[in-house]
C-alpha cells in the first residue's frame, strides 16, 4: 500500500513541476545568501590563511611586498622548534583547556539546572549579572589577581590557570547550559521524579543524556576559548605552565625579523584546535542551533 | 485499598490564588474526573496530589495519612502525563522499567513485571523500540504501562488523551475504562473534555476559578446541576438560557413567563422567589421539542446542521439564539419559522446569582455510577 501511494504521489508530482515566480524568488534569495555566506567566511578565514602562508616563507619574504608566489620553506618551523620545545607548551594548553572546561561544566551543570528548573524571581537578574562580569576589562582585575596568585603560590602553575579560565568561561557556560536545559521538556524530569529519581539521578539518567549535544557544544566552545586565551596566560605564567599562546608570544621581539617565525609558531599552536574543531563541527552546529530550529 | 482526602487545599503562586480551598474525598477504586475550563486549577490540583507541587495550605491524605511532606515517588502514585513524557533515549522496556531500576530491582524481576504490563497493554512486540518509533496511541500505552509497573494505589491521568486524534481517543477511552476494571485501582483523571468526563467517571468534580462548583455522578450533574456554570459546562451542545419572570410560586413549582408570552410551570423549590422576580430558564437542546401546533416558543431557523441521526437547529428568538437537537428526519429548512416547547420536568431555573432552584423530584438515574450503568446496558442489550 505504501509503495502504491508513493508511486502515485511521485507520478503526480513529476510532470507537474513548473517554476512558479515564488520558487524563483526563493532561488534568488538563496543565491544572495550563499554569496553573503562565502564573503563572510573568506573574510574571517583570510588572516588564518595568510598566517599559514607566512609561516612557510623566509623572514625577508615575510616582510616583503605581499605575494602569493614564493618557494615554501620549513626554515621557520625548524628554527621555532629549535628555540623552544613545542610539546611542553602544547601539553600545558591541553591540560589547562580541558581541565578548566571540565571544572566549569561541573560547576555550571548544577547551577544551570537550578536556574532552568527551579527559577526564582532573581534568576533572570542573576544570569544577566553573571554575563555582565564579562564586560569588565580583565586588566581591571589583573593586579589583585596577580597579588592573590603570588601569595597563594599559584603563579605559573597549571592549577592557577585552570582556576582563572574556569572563572572566565563560567558565565558563558552557565548561560548556554541554561538555554539548553530550558528547552528540555519539564514533564520528562517530573516523570522521573514520579518514578523515584533523586535529583542526582534525574540529572545523570535523564537531563545529561538528553541535553548531551548542548553540553558537548558548550564544552567545545569553552575548550576553544581557553585554548586561545592570551591575556591571563601571558601575565600569570612564565616557563612551567605556559600554554601555546605564551609560546607564540615568545617569538615576537622588539628588534629583528620575526614574522615568519611568529606565523609558524601560531600555525602550530592553532593546528590542534583547528583539527579538533573540524572533527566536532557537526556537534558544534547542532548544539549552537539547538532549539532555534525545530 | 486507596482513598484520598483533600482538606481545604489552597495554592498560591505569589499573589495569585490558583486553588482557593478545595475539600474532596475520593473513595477506594473510584474513577474521579476533574473537569473544567483551562486555567480552572484542575491540573495544579492533580500536581499537588502527585507531589510535584506543594500545597500552600491544607492537608492531602492518602489512606488517612498526611502526605504533604512526602516526596512524589513515595506517595504510592503513578502519573500519566499529557505529553506522555517518555524518556526519549530509552527503549519501551527501559521506559517501563525505569522506576524499578532506580529502586534497585534485579534485572530478571524487572523484565518479568514489564512483560506483564506489556501483555495487558499489548505492547510486547514494541519493547525494543525507542519512543520516536511509536505512534501516538502506542506512546500513550507505554506511558500507561510505565504507571502500571509501579503498582500504584492511585493512578493520576493528566489530560492523557488530548494529543490523540478523535478516533483513537474513543478507543483509548474504552481501553482506560477496561483497565480501571482490570486493575481495580483508584483513578483520578484530569480533562477539559466533558465527554471524557461523562463517559468514564464514577464521580465528576467540576472546577472553575480554583474552586469546586459541584461534585457528583455524571447523571447527577446532567440532571441536577447546582448552578448555571455546571449546567452550561456539562452537556453538549450547551444548555440554552432564556430570561424569564416569575408569575407565581407555590409548593408544586414556579410558574414563569416565557419570551414570546407563554407561561410554563417548572417543578422546582421556589426558595422564596416571588412574582415579578427575574430568573433564568435553562433547557438543554435535546429537551426542546419541535411542536408546530402548540409550542409556546417561536423563532426563525438560522442554521441547520444535519448529522444524520440528529439535526441541530440554531433558532433566533428575538435577540437570543437557541439550539435545538431534533430528529434526523425533520423537514424544516433554513429561515423557516418554528414553534417549539419542552416538558416542564426537563427545565431548570437559576436565580440572579446563577444558583439552581432545586428540583422537587430527583431524577431516577441521578445516583447511578458508571459500573451500574454498564451492567444495565448489558441487560438492555
Image: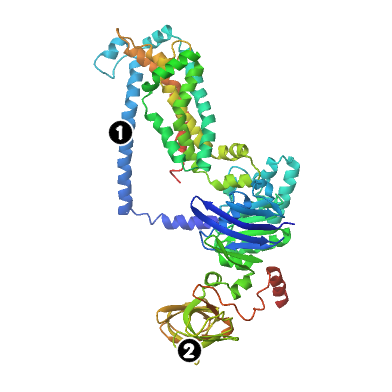
Q: How many marks?
A: 2
- The answer, for residue A89, to whether it is visible in the render is no
Quadrant in the rendering for residue B60: bottom right
Residue drawn 28% across and 18% down? A69
Percent x, y of residue B283? 53, 79
Identify the image quadrant of the N terminus of chain A.
bottom right
Residue drawn 31% across and 50% down? A24
Percent x, y of residue B182? 73, 60
Image position of A219 with respect to A139: above or below: below
Instruction: Report the side of A167 relative to A249 (left or right).
Output: right
Residue underneath mark 1:
A39
Residue drawn 46% across and 38% down? A286
Chain ID at mark 1:
A
Chain ID at mark 2:
B
Instruction: Report the side of B313 relative to A259 (left or right).
Output: right
Mark 1 residue element: helix
Camera-nearest label, 1 or 2: 2
Identify which residue, B54 or A184, lies in the foreground.
B54
Identify which residue, A123 or B185, lies in the foreground.
A123
Instruction: Report the side of B67 relative to A45 (left or right).
Output: right
Residue found farthest to the left: A65
- The answer, for residue A106, to whether it is visible in the render is yes
Q: Residues within 10 Å of mark 2 (few under 14, many from 20)?
A: few
Tell me the number on the disc at residue A274.
none
Mark 2 residue element: loop
Residue underneath mark 2:
B262
Instruction: Report the side of B66 relative to A224 (left or right).
Output: right
Amino acid at each position: 500500500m505504501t509503495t502504491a501511494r508513493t508511486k502515485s504521489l511521485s507520478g503526480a508530482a513529476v510532470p507537474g513541476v513548473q517554476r512558479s515566480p515564488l520558487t524563483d524568488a526563493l532561488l534568488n534569495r538563496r543565491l544572495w545568501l550563499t554569496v553573503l555566506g562565502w564573503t563572510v567566511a573568506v573574510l574571517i578565514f583570510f588572516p588564518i590563511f595568510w598566517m599559514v602562508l607566512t609561516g612557510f616563507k623566509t623572514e625577508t619574504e615575510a616582510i616583503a611586498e605581499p605575494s602569493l608566489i614564493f618557494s615554501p620553506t620549513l626554515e621557520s618551523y625548524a628554527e621555532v622548534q629549535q628555540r623552544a620545545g613545542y610539546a611542553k607548551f602544547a601539553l600545558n594548553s591541553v591540560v589547562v583547556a580541558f581541565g578548566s572546561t571540565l571544572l566549569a561544566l561541573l560547576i555550571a551543570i548544577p547551577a544551570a539546572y537550578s536556574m532552568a528548573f527551579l527559577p526564582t524571581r532573581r534568576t533572570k537578574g542573576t544570569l544577566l549579572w553573571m554575563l555582565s562580569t564579562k564586560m569588565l576589562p580583565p586588566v581591571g582585575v589583573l593586579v589583585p589577581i596577580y597579588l592573590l596568585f603570588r601569595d597563594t603560590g599559584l603563579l605559573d602553575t597549571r592549577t592557577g590557570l585552570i582556576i582563572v579560565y574556569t572563572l572566565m568561561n563560567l558565565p558563558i557556560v552557565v548561560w548556554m547550559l541554561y538555554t539548553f536545559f530550558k528547552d528540555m521538556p519539564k514533564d520528562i524530569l517530573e516523570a522521573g521524579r514520579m518514578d523515584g529519581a533523586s535529583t542526582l539521578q534525574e540529572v545523570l539518567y535523564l537531563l545529561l543524556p538528553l541535553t548531551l549535544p548542548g553540553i558537548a557544544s558548550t564544552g567545545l566552545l569553552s575548550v576553544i576559548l581557553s585554548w586561545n586565551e592570551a591575556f591571563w596566560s601571558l601575565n600569570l605564567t612564565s616557563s612551567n605552565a605556559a600554554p601555546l599562546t605564551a609560546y607564540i608570544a615568545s617569538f615576537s621581539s622588539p628588534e629583528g625579523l620575526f614574522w615568519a617565525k611568529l606565523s609558524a609558531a601560531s600555525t602550530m599552536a592553532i593546528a590542534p584546535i583547528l583539527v579538533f574543531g573540524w572533527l566536532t563541527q557537526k556537534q558544534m552546529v547542532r548544539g549552537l542551533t539547538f532549539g532555534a530550529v525545530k | 485499598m486507596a482513598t484520598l482526602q483533600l482538606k481545604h487545599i489552597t495554592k498560591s503562586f505569589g499573589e495569585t490564588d490558583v486553588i482557593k480551598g478545595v475539600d474532596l474525598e475520593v473513595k477506594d477504586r473510584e474513577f474521579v474526573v476533574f473537569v473544567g475550563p483551562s486555567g480552572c486549577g484542575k491540573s495544579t490540583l492533580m500536581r499537588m496530589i502527585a507531589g510535584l507541587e506543594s500545597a500552600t495550605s491544607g492537608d492531602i491524605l492518602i489512606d488517612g495519612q498526611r502526605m504533604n511532606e512526602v516526596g512524589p515517588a513515595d506517595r504510592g502514585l503513578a502519573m500519566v502525563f499529557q505529553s506522555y513524557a517518555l524518556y526519549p533515549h530509552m527503549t519501551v522496556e527501559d521506559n517501563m522499567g525505569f522506576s524499578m531500576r532506580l529502586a534497585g530491582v534485579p534485572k530478571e524481576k524487572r523484565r518479568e513485571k514489564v512483560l506483564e504490563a506489556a501483555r495487558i497493554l499489548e505492547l510486547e512486540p514494541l519493547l525494543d523500540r525507542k519512543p520516536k518509533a511509536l505512534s501516538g496511541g502506542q506512546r500513550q500505552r507505554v506511558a500507561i504501562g510505565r504507571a502500571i509497573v509501579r503498582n500504584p494505589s492511585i493512578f493520576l491521568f493528566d489530560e492523557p488523551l488530548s494529543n490523540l486524534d478523535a478516533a483513537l481517543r474513543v478507543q483509548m477511552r474504552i481501553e482506560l475504562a477496561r483497565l480501571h476494571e482490570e486493575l481495580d485501582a483508584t483513578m483520578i483523571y484530569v480533562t477539559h473534555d466533558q465527554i471524557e468526563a461523562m463517559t468514564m467517571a464514577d464521580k465528576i468534580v467540576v472546577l472553575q476559578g480554583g474552586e469546586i462548583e459541584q461534585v457528583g455522578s455524571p447523571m447527577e450533574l446532567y440532571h441536577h446541576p447546582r448552578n448555571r456554570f455546571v449546567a452550561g459546562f456539562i452537556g453538549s451542545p450547551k444548555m440554552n438560557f432564556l430570561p424569564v419572570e416569575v408569575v407565581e410560586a407555590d409548593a408544586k413549582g414556579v410558574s414563569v413567563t416565557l419570551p414570546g408570552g407563554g407561561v410554563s410551570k417548572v417543578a422546582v423549590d421556589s426558595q422564596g422567589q416571588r412574582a415579578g422576580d427575574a430568573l433564568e430558564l435553562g433547557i438543554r437542546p435535546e429537551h426542546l421539542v419541535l411542536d408546530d401546533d402548540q409550542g409556546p416558543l417561536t423563532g426563525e431557523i438560522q442554521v441547520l446542521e444535519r448529522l444524520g441521526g440528529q439535526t441541530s437547529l440554531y433558532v433566533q428568538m428575538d435577540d437570543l439564539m437557541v439550539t435545538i437537537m431534533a430528529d434526523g428526519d425533520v423537514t424544516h429548512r433554513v429561515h423557516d419559522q418554528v414553534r417549539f416547547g419542552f416538558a416542564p420536568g426537563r427545565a431548570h431555573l437559576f436565580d440572579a446569582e446563577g444558583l439552581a432552584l432545586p428540583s422537587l423530584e430527583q431524577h431516577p438515574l441521578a445516583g447511578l455510577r458508571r459500573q451500574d450503568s454498564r451492567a444495565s446496558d448489558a441487560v438492555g442489550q
